[in-house]
Image: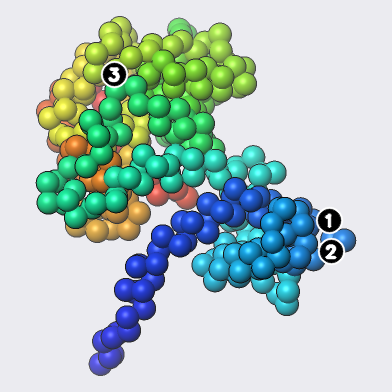
Amino acid sequence: MSQPNLSPDLFFETANAYQRSAALKAAVELGVFTAIGKLSQDGSQGATAEAVAAQCGASQRGIRILCDYLTIIGFITKEGQSYSLTPATTMFLNQSSPAYVGGALRFLNSPMIMQGFNDLTTTVRQGRTTLPAEGSVTPDHPMWVDFARGMAPLMMMPAQGMVGLVQGDTAHPLATDRPLKVLDIAAGHGVFGIAFARQFPNAQITAVDWQNVLQVAQENAAASGVSDRYHLLPGSAFEVDFGGGYDLILITNFLHHFDVATNEQLLRKIRAAMAPDGRALTLEFVPNDDRISPPMAAAFSLTMLGSTPSGDAYTFAQLESMFRNAGFSQSELHTLPPTLIQVVTSYP
C-alpha cells in the first residue's frame, strides 16, 4: 500500500504560481526566447546569461536568475552555462516563428482579465464576477481588440481543423455549384472565417463582431487575399440581423460567456438563419461530465466565473441540450488534436 503524499509542495507551488506568469511575461517582453534562439542558431557563442543579457539589454544577474527559473518550469533547458529552447518554445515563443503566440499575453494577462481574480472570495460568494458592468461581456469592450490581435496565432491550428471536419463530412457535402454562405459569429481576429475563405474559393464570409474588433479581422482578411469575399456586420450577435440561407455558421469561443437561457436565445436566431442543409460549428473547451477532466477544459469554468456574470465551460450534454431546445435535430462532438479544444457540429 502506497504512503499518502504529505508534502506541502502543492501548497507552496500554488501560492507562488503568480511568479510563473510574471516570469513568462518578463521573458516575452524582454525577448529572451528570441535571443536564445538567435544565439543558438548563430553558433558563434553559446546562449549564456551574459550573451542573452547583451541581446536583451538587461542585467546579467537578472537574466541568469530569470533563465534558471524558466529552465526549472520547463520553457528552456540548460547545459553547463548555456541555455537552449525546447521544441515547443521554439515554435510558440520565438518571434521568428510563424506560430509565435507571445502576443496573446496582452489579452491573457491584461489588467482587465487579472482584475477579475483579485477578490475571488467575493466572486465565489456571489456567483458572478466582481468586474465592473458585465465584465468581459460588456458591450464593445476594448479588451477584445487585444484578444483579436494577440490570439490569432493560437487559433490557426483549430481553424484548419474545423475546415478539415467540414471537408471530411461526406454525409453532408457542401454545394460547389453556388456561392457558399458562411456566417462567422464573434469573428474577432477573423481566423476561422478566413480559413474557410482560403479553402473554398466560392465562399462568401460575413463576420459579426464589434466595429473596432472587425477592423482587425478586415486587416487579416486583406493579408490573406480574401478581402473581396469578406463582409463585415458590426454589432451585437444578439441584435444584428444576420439575414439567412447560411450553409455554415461558425460559433467560436462564444457560448461559454453566457448562461444556458441566453445561449438558447442566440441559437434559435442562428437556426433561423441557416439553409435547410446547413450546419453550425461551435468551438469550445468541453469538459467531461465529471467537470474535472480534461484539466484545461474543466478549469476554464473558473476563468468564466472570474470574468463573466454567468458564463461557464459546458459539457457536451449541456451543449447538445441547448441546440436541441433551439430547434436543431442532431449534434456531434469532434476533437481537434493536438489541441484540447473541441467542435460541436449541429444540423437543423
Mark 1 burial class by Cα count in 10 Å: few <14, some 14-19, many 20+: few
Q: Where is residue 67 shown, x and y percent of the image?
A: 62, 65
What is the three-letter code of the residue carrying label 3?
Answer: Ala
Query: Which of the marked residues, 3 or 1, is nearer the chain's N terminus?
Result: 1
What is the three-letter code of the residue carrying label 1?
Answer: Asp
Q: Is 14 drawn above or below residue 133 in the view shown?
A: below
Q: Is 68 drawn above or below residue 326 in the view shown?
A: below
Q: Where is residue 176 shown, x and y percent of the image?
A: 47, 13
The residue at 40%/42% (across/down) is 111
What is the three-letter code of the residue carrying label 2?
Answer: Gln
Task: Give left or right: position of 155 versus 233.
Answer: right
Q: Where is residue 8 shown, x and y percent of the image?
A: 32, 80
Locate the N terminus by quadrant: bottom left
Q: CA distance from mark 3 to mark 1?
A: 50 Å
Residue located beneath label 2 in the image: 45
Tags 1 and 2 touching, CB below 8 Å? yes
The residue at 36%/78% (across/down) is 9
Secondary structure of the residue carrying numbered label 1? helix
Q: Where is residue 167 shown, x and y percent of the image?
A: 46, 29
Task: Give left or right: position of 76 versus 120.
Answer: right
Residue located beneath label 3 in the image: 237
In depth, the one of 327 and 186 nearer the eye is: 186
Number of marks in picture: 3
Residue located beneath label 1 in the image: 42
Quarter assignment of residue 282: top left
